[in-house]
Structures are given as C-alpha cells and as structure tokens.
C-alpha cells in the first residue's frame, strides 16, 4: 500500500477510528482527494467514508458500501482475517439472493459451512474470482468448493431458495404509457395454495427459466441433440430450467482450453484467468463463447457441468398481505439491451414480462427483510424515496398503513423519465393523497425539461420540511440503484441536514450515521 502524506487541511479520521497509523494516513489522503473540499458548497461522503470518518465502523467493515469498487474494498480489507476479506469481496448489497447477507455468507464460507462460492448474484464473476483467490491463498480447494451443492432442501418450504414453494401466476399489466422508453409490469401471484405469507419490506424470490429461443440457439452452436440425456433430463430441459446462460463462467473457458490447441487454447486459458485478449469479453455470454470458439467440440455432459447454476431472482414486494391476503405483487422492469448487434434479455424480467402465463405454477420463496421495514409505532412518520421500480416497497408500505389504520404521516418522493408515460400507480397514489393516507407526494421527471430533475434534487428543494420531519422522529427509506441513486440520495440527505440543521459537514454526516444506527435510515438497494 502506498502511503500518502495526510492533508493538513482535512483530517478525516478521528483518533478513535480502528486503523493503524499507516492506514489512517492513507485513508485521510484518500478521503481528502474524494472530498475536494472548498467553499463552493456541501459535498457528502459515501456510506463507507461516513463510517470510517465517524468511527461508526464498530464491526471493522469500512468497505460495507455497495457503491465502492471491489479493488477499493479489498484494499481496505488488507491485513484482516479471512472472513473479513471474504466479506469485502461480496457485493455489499445485503440483498439476500445468496440466502444470507454479505457478512454471514462470508462467515459461512470461512467456517466451512457453505461450499458454494458463486451465490453472490450482484457481484457475479468478479466476486467469484476474488473468493476463489482468497480461498486458495488460505489453502482451501476452491475449485471443489465452487462445485459443492447441497443435496437436501434447507428450511421450511417457500422460505429459502433451496426449498421453494409453488405459486400461481395470475396476471401482468403494463405500467408505462405510450412514449415510454421503459417496459415495466405490475405482476401478481396467488399464494393461497402455497401457504406463504409475508410482511412489507420482504422480497419475493422467483425461480425463473431461460428463454427457449436462447436455449435452442445454444444447442445449435453446441452441435448437440436437444433430447440428449443429462442426468435424467433432456439437454434442452436442463438448459431451460437449471443452467445460467449469461456471462460465460471461467469453467467454460477452461473446458474449451482442454479440448483445443494452439492459439485457441491460449486465448481460452487467458479468458479463464480473467484476461481479455481480444477485447470482446463483454460479448462473451455462453452463446457468444460457443460462437467465438466454434472449433471446440464439447460433449453435452461436460458443457452443462461447466455452466453455473441458474440463480433465483429477488424482487421487492409491492403489495401488503394485510391489505390483500393470499395475493402478492411485484413491479418489474423488463431488461432488454444489445451488445453489438445481438439482443440480450434479462432472465427473470422477460420470464415475468412475457413468457409465464396465467395459471402457470412458478417456484417461489419469501426472503425475509434484513433491516428494512415499517417502524413498529404506527404513529411514526415515514419518508420514502423510490424512483422507478424503487417505488415497489413503498406502494406496499402505503397499502399496509392504510389497511392497519396507522395514522403516522407518509411522504413519498417518486421520479422517472416522463410524467405522461412513466408515472407508475398514478391514480392509486393520487387517491391515497386525497384520502389522507399519503401526506406528501413529491415528483421528479428527468426527461420532461431541459434540466434533468431527480429525486435528490427535490429533496434539496424541500430540505427545510424534510429536516423538520426528521426532527419529529420520521424514518427515512430509499429503494433503487445502489451504485448511483442511493449514494446521491445520501449525499442530498447530508446536504439537507447541514443546511437546515445548521451543522458542519462532519456533524451532518454524524447525524445521518446516527439515523442509520437507530434504524431510522434504511435502504433496499440493488
């Protein structure tokens, strides 16, 4: 680690922060560079910087920030025990898709209780490679660990990814109007036969299937028979229901290197090592890899063995069991994009948006929320910030508070691209406002004028009122993109506290950190 001289004008870390003098010196210089403090205005720190600065990282995890790059997280974890290094390699979203949160997943791996290193869906291949490297450094057979899979279901039915229940798909309706650049669906399932319930703030796991068109294209390039037997299932059935066909795993590149020679073999080996010899790594999903290495002759059995398992997808629940028992709804953006000339499709989002049909039984499970839910006191005011599909859990909050007769104030910040085409649940929200359930509805549209207006801009505009709510004991919630939006919202919150609370930057950061510690600032990010 290169040590920088501390900036004499910006001493960020307090003496009580749990770092050595070398780490303190480097971090002070690092944070000072990020802050670039001058007299132009208020600039907030990221969540990890907040924790380090205010000495709030009691668990010794200053990297616990989903917006921080993995290289920076691993640098902060240097010299720590293996469980903490593994923790730093996770995506830091605490999304629950792995069946844990980031810290407990890493602890389970370190203790030998969890052999699968490929469960961190947001971290993807980047996290997997780092976990393998860390385990190999520690002397563990990482390759064997990656392949280890449980043979028996875990937990009650419908309460874990390993043991899903069956729910009946009911319907989908499009939430966008003509002129929208998005394709967003309100999706409903019937839970009455599954025996499942949930509380607002929970997430719903969907065990989706691959698009058969993609599967057929993969089989064609593989040069195999669709009905080839793979462990009692046909190759086509296996690829549709059980194998991930997104970014090509390292194991597939390794397999190709075993059955080819010359330059082809060397390229495959370099790709397996994380290199990008031809500058086309972003195009190498499973289909793209088969096309690139069309000379490789892979047996269906070895090919399937080299693929990662198809992971469930988690969605924020947008309904309240108290309001509509036996029914659950989601708010889903359909993911479609192109890399080069080839279209790509989100697995679960297109499954929900077009392929699953009313009456179909879908494997599902409820993932209990980790520190994201309504306050216990129904009189506590809540402020909710959810642009785009981030509105999902807050629709659930509002329906729940209405159904239970909670009389606390409710304020929603919602934003999207265009009011005419992207105002999700407009009639519903306006009706709640008229009924008094929704005290405040503040809107932000980023494509309706020459200036892009986002929810964080509206927060600053309404800063005096926002700070007054916080002083009255309000809980603040944000849901949406972890990399940019959630970080921008936190910066706006610190700005609001600094300006309207008449506090210094350090004091405003401490105020927000205290909200988090008290469970009054909660995030559901992805």
Image (spheres, rainbow, N blue to C red):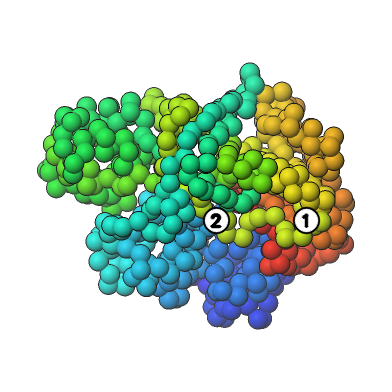
Tell me where residue 344 sits by quadrant: top left
In the rendered view, tell whether residue 124 sits above or below residue 166. below
x, y percent for residue 472? 86, 59
x, y percent for residue 340? 40, 28
Q: Nearer the viewer, residue 381 or 121?
A: 381
* Residue behind mark 1: 378
Residue drawn at x 63%, y 64% is: 49
Mark 2 nearby-residue class (10 Å; few <14, some 14–19, many ≥20): some
Q: Is residue 484 left or right of residue 334?
A: right
- From where the camera sits, is residue 488 visible? no
Q: Is residue 385 left or right of residue 290?
A: right
Residue drawn at x 22%, y 43% is: 304
x, y percent for residue 65? 57, 59
Instruction: Please state the total of marks drawn on the protein image.
Output: 2
Residue drawn at x 78%, y 67% is: 507
Q: Earlier in the sequence, mark 2 or mark 1?
A: 2
Indicate which disc residue 84 carries: none
In the rendered view, tell whether residue 471 sits above or below residue 487. below
Secondary structure under the numbered disc 2 in the rendered image = loop
- Which residue occupies the extreme top position in the image? 178
Q: Is residue 419 left or right of residue 153?
A: right
Mark 1 nearby-residue class (10 Å; few <14, some 14–19, many ≥20): some
Tell me where residue 434 sits by quadrant: top right
In the rendered view, tell whether residue 522 sits above or below residue 277. below
Q: Is residue 456 left or right of residue 524?
A: right
Q: Nearer the viewer, residue 248 or 42?
A: 248
* Residue behind mark 2: 368
Q: Nearer the viewer, residue 204 or 282?
A: 204
- From where the camera sits, is residue 244 visible? yes
Residue drawn at x 55%, y 74% is: 60
């Amino acid at each position: 680690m290169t040590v920088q001289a501390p900036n004499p004008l910006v001493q960020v870390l307090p003496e009580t922060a749990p770092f050595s003098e070398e780490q303190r010196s480097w971090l002070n210089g690092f944070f000072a560079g990020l802050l670039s403090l001058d007299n132009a205005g208020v600039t907030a720190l990221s969540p990890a910087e907040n924790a380090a600065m205010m000495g709030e990282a009691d668990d010794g995890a200053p990297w616990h920030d989903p917006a921080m790059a993995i290289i920076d997280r691993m640098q902060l974890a240097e010299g720590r025990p293996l469980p903490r290094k593994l923790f730093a390699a996770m995506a830091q979203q605490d999304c629950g898709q792995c069946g844990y949160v980031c810290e407990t997943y890493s602890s389970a791996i370190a203790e030998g209780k969890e052999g699968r290193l490929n469960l961190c869906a947001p971290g993807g291949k980047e996290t997997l490679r780092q976990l393998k490297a860390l385990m190999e450094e520690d002397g563990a057979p990482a390759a064997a660990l990656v392949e280890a899979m449980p043979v028996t279901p875990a937990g009650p039915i419908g309460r874990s990814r390993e043991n899903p229940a069956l729910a009946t798909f009911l319907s989908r309706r499009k939430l966008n109007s003509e002129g929208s650049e998005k394709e967003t669906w309100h999706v409903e399932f019937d839970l009455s036969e599954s025996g499942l319930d949930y509380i607002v703030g929970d997430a719903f796991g969907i065990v989706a299937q691959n698009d058969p068109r993609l599967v057929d294209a993969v089989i064609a390039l593989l040069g195999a028979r669709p009905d080839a037997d793979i462990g009692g299932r046909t190759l086509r059935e296996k690829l549709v229901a059980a194998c991930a066909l997104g970014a090509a795993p390292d194991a597939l590149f390794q397999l190709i290197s075993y059955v080819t020679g010359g330059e082809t073999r060397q390229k495959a080996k370099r790709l397996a090592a994380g290199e990008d010899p031809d500058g086309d790594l972003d195009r190498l999903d499973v289909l793209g890899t088969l096309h690139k290495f069309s000379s490789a002759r892979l047996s269906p059995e070895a090919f399937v063995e080299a693929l990662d398992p198809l992971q469930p997808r988690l969605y924020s629940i947008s309904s309240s069991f108290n309001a509509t028992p036996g029914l659950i709804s989601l708010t889903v953006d359909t993911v479609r994009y192109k890399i080069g000339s080839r279209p790509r499709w989100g697995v679960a989002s297109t499954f929900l948006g077009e392929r699953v049909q009313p009456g179909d039984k879908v494997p599902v499970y409820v993932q209990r929320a980790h520190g994201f839910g309504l306050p216990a006191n129904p009189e506590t005011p809540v402020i909710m910030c959810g642009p785009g599909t981030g509105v999902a859990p807050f629709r659930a909050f509002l329906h729940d508070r209405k159904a239970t007769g909670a009389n606390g104030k409710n304020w929603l910040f919602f934003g999207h691209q265009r009011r005419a085409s992207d105002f999700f649940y407009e009639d519903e929200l306006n009706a709640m406002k008229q009924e008094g359930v929704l005290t405040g509805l503040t809107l932000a549209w980023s494509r309706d004028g020459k200036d892009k207006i986002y929810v964080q801009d509206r927060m600053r505009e309404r800063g005096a009122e926002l700070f007054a709510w916080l002083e009255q004991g309000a809980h603040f919630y944000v849901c949406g993109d972890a990399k940019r939006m959630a970080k921008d919202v936190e910066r706006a919150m610190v700005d609001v506290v600094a300006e309207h609370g008449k506090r210094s930057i350090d004091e405003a950061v401490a105020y927000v950190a205290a909200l988090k510690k008290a469970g009054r600032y909660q995030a559901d990010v992805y």
